[in-house]
Amino acid sequence: MAVLIAGPAMANDGIGSVSTGGIIVGKTDAVAMKKEVLTVSTELIKVEYEFLNESNSDVEETIIFPLPAYEAGYHQSPTYYGQPQQFSIEVDGKPRDYQTVLVARLGGKDVTARLKALGLTDRQVAYFPSFTPFDRKVEPLTAKQKKAMIEEDLLARLSDDEQWVPAWSVTVVYQWQQKFPAGKTVRVRHQYAPFVAAGPGASYLGDGNEFEKKYCGDKAFHATWNRLAKKQGESGFVNAKWVSYILKTGNTWKNGIEDFTLNLVKGKPDELVSLCFPGTFTKVNPTTLQVKLRNFRPAQDLNVYFGNVDDAGENTGEAPALRGSYLKTK
């Protein structure tokens, strides 16, 4: 059975903060994103920014990089949960440290303070002791903690014969304080292995117009896809991976993204690529497609379909490392 759900998306850097109300996205009229080069493949996402403080005074902002929320309960695999592998931040060519903020939410309510009051550690909140897909050993709950959490509906059962699992979800946010000197350019770079949805059984492209709405496959794309599927015989599948990326947080900067470049990198020349995106792509080399936009204000996020891939395996996420982390409670 193919994994046909959309993978969680990573995001552009944005200005904001994390509080008891959740992730708060702000906006600046002083700092402009002069340039962004985003390179997307199924194995690696790399993004390079150039920011310029166009005001007459130095500005310091909290930069947030939100990760996909994941349920703290039972999961078969860490593929869509936790933190991406190989994540790194560089500012002006030098490695930059960051804080890992954990926020636990239940029914729209921030419950991190309550979990902390019950004595749960960061590790227990991030990957629960009764079951973890991250292959990490976590200290067990005490009988008193478990009893209180059951009474407060912080624990739940998936069915009558299953063990108690946490009812909350976990959001991990990378954040750091960044100074933007007046009139100077600051260069920021990230790279990491993306979460992907993948599967060898992508034997259909969605019901009705689902694929067209999300990935804008044209007649040529479908003709090639059908030809490839037919070559597989009765199985009729085309190995595929889906990669998503949140672009709209780029609108938090002054003037949006003034100079934007998107590179799509295929694993081999005959891979299929389809996405909904403005502009006209050019072929830079046999495996790279590129589009450039000026004064770009993203109206939608990025979803890319890579078909006819050799390896339909999944990139597995890592458990929150909790290095320098803290539970945000106020």
Image (cartoon, rainbow, N blue to C red):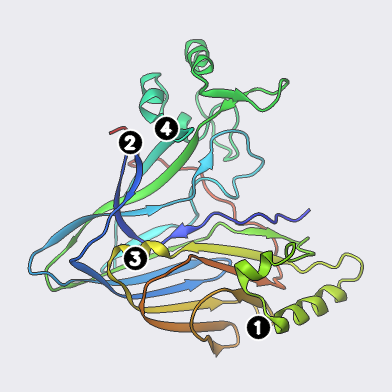
Question: Disc 4 or 2, which lies upstream in sequence?
Answer: 2
Q: Which mark is residue 269?
A: 1
Which residue position holds label 3? 251
Amino acid of disc 2: Thr
Mark 3 touching mark 2, by CB under 8 A? no
Q: Is residue 329 above or below residue 223?
A: above
Question: Disc 1 or 3, which lies upstream in sequence?
Answer: 3
Amino acid of disc 3: Asn
* Residue at (28% x, 66% y) in the render: 253
* Secondary element at tag 2: loop
Instruction: Find the distance from the CA under tag 4 to the CA under tag 2.
Output: 8 Å
Please indicate whether residue 245 sits to the left or right of residue 52 in the image.
Answer: right
Instruction: Find the distance from the CA under tag 3 to the CA under tag 2.
Output: 24 Å
Closer mark to the observer between disc 4 and disc 1: 4
Residue 257 point in image, percent of width and height: 33, 73
Nearest the camera: 47 or 4?
4
* Secondary element at tag 1: loop
Question: Disc 3 or 2, which lies upstream in sequence?
Answer: 2
Question: Disc 1 or 2, which lies upstream in sequence?
Answer: 2
Instruction: Find the distance from the CA under tag 1 to the CA under tag 3.
Output: 33 Å
Mark 1 touching mark 2, by CB under 8 A? no
Nearest the camera: 209 or 53?
209
Residue 155 point in image, percent of width and height: 55, 23
Instruction: Find the distance from the CA under tag 4 to the CA under tag 1.
Output: 47 Å
Nearest the camera: 234 or 303?
303
* Residue at (33% x, 59% y) in the render: 14
Q: Which mark is residue 20?
A: 2
Amino acid of disc 1: Pro
Which residue position holds label 4? 109
Instruction: Find the distance from the CA under tag 1 to the CA under tag 2.
Output: 47 Å
Question: Disc 4 or 1, which lies upstream in sequence?
Answer: 4
